[in-house]
Amino acid sequence: MILTYLKCPFCGSTDVGKYDTNNGKQRYICKNEKCSHKTFYEEYIYTPASPA
């Protein structure tokens, strides 16, 4: 079994959880209260929407 840890791409926090799905893609929520964004995708289809 392989465990992967997600980091919020905006604040770097590892305190994230599953939020919902949109168009078949899993969305995650950052539980850090000081984060500027709350939800994000692990993998973006439309690359200009990516925080990178």
Image: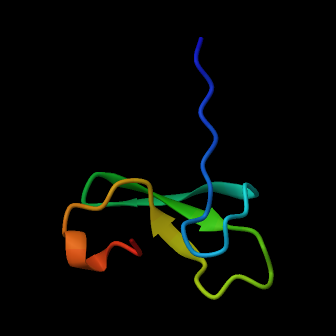
Choose top left, top right, bottom left or bottom right for residue 49.
Answer: bottom left
Judging from the image, the colouring scheme is rainbow
Q: Which residue is drawn at 41% across and 75% down?
A: 51
Position of the C terminus, as image quadrant, is bottom left
Residue placed at 76% from the left, 57% from the top? Answer: 15
Residue closest to the eye, 39 or 11: 11
Name the residue located 54 percent from the left edge and 73 percent from the top edge: 39
Q: Is residue 32 left or right of residue 4?
A: right
Q: Position of residue 13 (x, y in %)?
A: 73, 63
User: What is the tally of numbered marks visible in this picture?
Assistant: 0
Rendering coords of residue 22 (x, y %): 33, 63
Residue at 54%, 67% (x, y): give it: 9
Q: Quadrant of the N terminus?
A: top right
Residue 33 drawn above or below residue 4: below
Does residue 3 appear left or right of residue 46 in this picture? right
Task: Tell me the quarter of the picture where residue 10 sits.
Answer: bottom right
Q: Is residue 42 above or below residue 33?
A: above
Q: In this view, does 6 lie to the left or right of 47?
A: right
Residue 2: x and y in percent read 58, 18
- Report the residue that reaches farthest toward the left: 46
Q: In the displayed image of the protein, which residue is found farthest to the front?
A: 52
**Residue extending farthest top:** 1
Q: Which residue lies furthest to the right in this view?
A: 33
